[in-house]
Amino acid sequence: MDKFTRLTAKACPLMRQNIDTDQILPARFLKWPRDKGLGSVLFTDIRTDAGGNDLADFPLNRPAWRNARVLIAGRNFGGGSSREAAVYAVYDYGFRCVIAPSFGDIFAQNSVKNGLLTAALPEAEVTELAAAIEADPAREVTVDLQQQTITCGNRSYTFTIDPVSRNQLLNGWDDVDLTGSYRAQVEAFRARDRQARPWAALDR
Amino acid sequence: MRHTPQTLFDKLWSSHQIAQREDGAALLFVDRHFVHEGSFHGFSQVKSRGRKVAEPALTFGIADHYVPTHDRDKPIANPEIAEMVRKLERNTADNNVALFGLRDPRQGIVHVVGPEQGLTLPGLLIVCGDSHTSTHGAFGTYAFGIGASEVAHVLMTQTLWQKKPKRMRINVEGDAGIGIAAKDIALAIIARIHADGAQGHAIEYAGSAIRALSMEGRLTLCNMSIEGGGRCGMVAPDETTFAYIEGRPYAPMGEAFARAIEDWSKLPTDAGAEFDREVTLDAASIAPIVTWGTTPDDALPIDARAPDPSRETDETRAAYIRGALDYMGLKPGMKLTDVVIDRVFIGSCTNARIEDLRAAAAVLSGRTSKVPGLVSPGSSLVKQQAEQEGLDRIFKDAGLEWVESGCSMCVGINGDLVPEGERCASTTNRNFRGRQGRGARTHLMSPAMVAAAAVTGHLADVRPLLAGREV
Ligand code: SF4
């Protein structure tokens, strides 16, 4: 997976609460293979009208934010379905960081596996940051994962992310390889577990 | 020396922990892994690494998300959907994984089939690439939904890295009234804690009203944990749990079952164990509940009115309400019982088990539905049982369609969609924008409440309709 350390880019505010994964990527696109790229259908049902035309007032459609790489959203971003393809869509579109007061747990976990940073800030600070960018859409923000800061103009905010996710993003770890190095512990566990929970086994 | 009192969740966690990293992440052993058509992303990752499924005997494939609910004896008409079902067949066959496929008599929705087959047991850790895996927690199981990369990791290693969630206990005390279902309890809880209220927490449901629930009811409750933001929810195993498990195909038998009960009886939370957060609700105060908006916490008692954004002081909230009412096509402050519906859906892993079908049939019996609708049982075995009980006749006589089992109109990816702009009274778990189809308007409620909506043509209190009936 891709590492995340530091990024300076435009940020697009999408200040709605509860943007669930069904809105991020409607279920009908879940059939698409990853290599097709899902960026073109990100938010499609809230970004376009029934005829498929871009809605002018949807922030991502505003020219100033077309190439934004940071997304700023309301509380509970990415709640709902576990579809990792929602993260693929956000990532494939070009976003590398989402800032919000809170995230759906599975969405946040899926993000880490794909090099997408989910940075949590208190609601008032998210609102302030979004307002600053609304006032000056061309303004860039700098997201620094090492320092856990977001800087916009002369304002700097400290975001939270759990240390496990931070570690993984900074190092670009591959979970499967990492787990491979725990083989001896896994085998010891299984031998113990066979005795402790015989009813849990299933042999065919 | 005395042990520190532990919660059910602590016990489940520690019995699965293989190792712990310095940053706090733990490597956990996975006892059962369910895969469905949507798991193809995970299988692709496995294949691209040149790997195979590590523990085929602990992995089970189930065709549910894309399966057609009509004309099962014919080839699947839509080529893309047919390909999704075929991919699952190929991926499971290539890896020697058992499959409850499209035409298997045991086919059904993964979260109905697991318990039904005795694959879901207390004390296990179960994962599936589906957020409603929380359902299996009803047995005192640590069960949660995972994404495709995690699916791939479990397929290759039978383990998963997790950070330990905080512990939350939701107590529901007292007796729920007549006509109040587990779904009403679940929606009441979500309305109280909000859609993100349990984020980062493992929920334990406790209290006398929870103990009084059947396994079906506990499954409904745990199913909706994710709608309150929790990744998992659980109920401590007891006699109700053991009685449900006994004799199921994959459950331990004889002496092994006796030993299991002995072990499972030690799982419930110890007296004095600490939770990071506790919430208590009074069951007697819970009325039949419906959702009016576009997240499951937009839930109100049926005798309430839709909210009025002009009475809201918080501008963000007011804007949200305006948007939700607009999407749902509702007027501010209107009575919820005045909301006229276009169709009904009875189905999904939330509410399509046998008790759910009985509860809906009890209301529909001898009556007709004013709107069209689908009834899709939670599994093919539930369908068979319902037919033996004559429930299918009740639904058909009422004018509803009795179809095969699958996720169906819960997510619509098999083609069972709510047409744009139409309003559906639904036993499912998500009323998100576009969930049942682009522009579809979903109202969540219990099976009996959906039946009441069908009979009256609008959202309605089921209780008067139950007068003189056996429920
Ligand atoms: S019925 Fe709905 S919620 Fe349940 S597994 Fe299927 S799609 Fe998911």
Image (cartoon, rainbow, N blue to C red):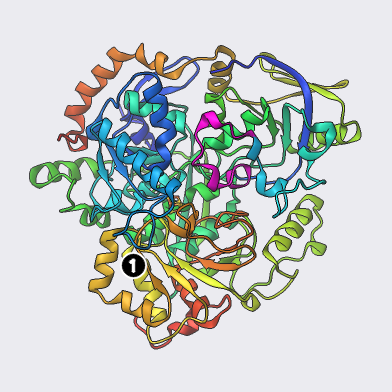
Ligand 1 is within 8 Å of the C-beta of the residue at disc 1: no
Q: Relative to the observer, which residue lies in front, B106 or A61?
A: A61
Find residue B385 and report its horizontal and vertical position in percent: 24, 67
* Residue appearing at x 25%, y 60% in the figure: B381
Horizontally, is B337 left or right of B240 in the view? Answer: right
Q: Is residue B194 above or below residue A64?
A: below
Q: Callout 1: helix, strand or loop?
A: helix
Indicate whether B216 appears above or below A65: below
Q: Quadrant of the N terminus of chain B?
A: top left
Answer yes or no: is residue B341 visible. Answer: yes
Count neighbours of disc 1 (C-alpha within 10 A) and say few if under 14, some if 14 to 19, many if 20 or more: some
Q: Is residue A24 shown in magenta? A: yes
- Give the x, y percent position of residue B122: 28, 44
Residue B111 place in picture, x, y as percent: 36, 50
User: Can you give x and y, in whole percent of width and height, for residue A138 in the image?
Assistant: 87, 27
Q: Residue at x 64, y 59 (%)?
A: B439
User: Dot 1 corresponds to which residue?
Assistant: B355
Q: Residue at x 80, y 64 (%)?
A: B311
Q: Does B209 appear in magenta?
A: no
Res B397 → quadrant: bottom left
The span picked out in magenta is A21-39
Chain of the residue on which disc 1 is drawn: B
- The kind of residue on which mark 1 rests is Glu
